[in-house]
Image (tube, rainbow, N blue to C red):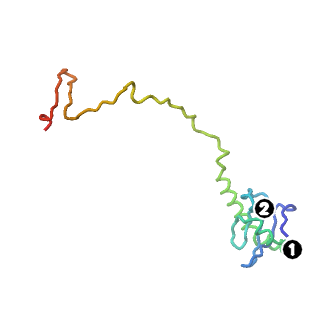
Amino acid sequence: MYNTAKKQVWFGELRTTRGTSIVIHDNQLPDASPGRIYLYNVSRNTIGEYVEDIVKANLHELTTDQVKTSKAEHEAAWIAARAEFLAKHQAHMELSSVPDSAPPSKSKKSEPIDKGLDEVVDVDDNDMEFEDADTGFNATMDDDESE
């Protein structure tokens, strides 16, 4: 039965309806999601995340001779997959552990838009008065002049 408490690296066999495969569990790998474990699957040549409650019943110990044979055949591939896995997981740092680097935001006071205007003035575009800023001359635009 699957028991990693005694060994840092556990070699075992995963028996499923699809067949059997040698798997390796390493206690030094980062923790998987709650209720899941990481196993290196020799058949797939990859470290995968498995639901512990489902897979645990299908994991079986290897005999001493089977462990020696498995180590000799698969240890190099396991070490390479482990190094790749650790490199990827170290690159995905948990963002909550990264300190904020942005400066604190300044709150802006909102100013009133009307700036003292108390009433709304409806302006008729046809009867507008214009004042020339340079000469001070007032001109009135009537309906007759606009066309």
Location of mark 2 (residue): 26
Residue situated in front as seen by the camera: 66 or 93: 93
> Which residue is depicted at the point 28% across and 32% down?
122
Could you say where residue 137 lies in the image, as x and y percent from the top left?
A: 17, 22
Name the side, left or right, on which 123 lies relative to 70: left
Does 33 sit above or below residue 144? below
Relative vertical location of residue 7 with respect to residue 94 in this rendering, above or below:
below
Q: Secondary structure at mark 1?
A: loop
Alpha-carbon span between mark 2 and mark 1: 18 Å
Marks counted in the figure total 2
Q: Amino acid at mark 2?
A: Asp
Give the farthest residue toward the top: 136
What residue sits 21% from the left and 30% below the top? 128
- The residue beneath circle 1 is 63
The disc at residue 90 is none
Image quadrant holding the N terminus, namely bottom right
- Which badge, 2 or 1, comes first in the chain's sequence? 2
Question: Left of 61 or right of it: where is 135?
Answer: left
Q: Estimate the x, y position of residue 76 in percent, counting from the top left.
A: 74, 67
Q: Is residue 93 left or right of residue 109?
A: right
- x 82%, y 65%: residue: 10
Camera-side residue of 29 and 84: 29
Q: Secondary structure at mark 2?
A: strand
Residue 26 in the image: above or below residue 140: below
**Observer-nearest of 132 and 61:** 132
Camera-side residue of 141 and 81: 141
Q: Is residue 130 left or right of residue 14?
A: left
Q: Residues within 10 Å of mark 2 (few under 14, many from 20)?
A: some
Rate crowding at label 1 as few (under 14), some (14 to 19) or many (20 or more) other CA atoms within 10 Å. Answer: few
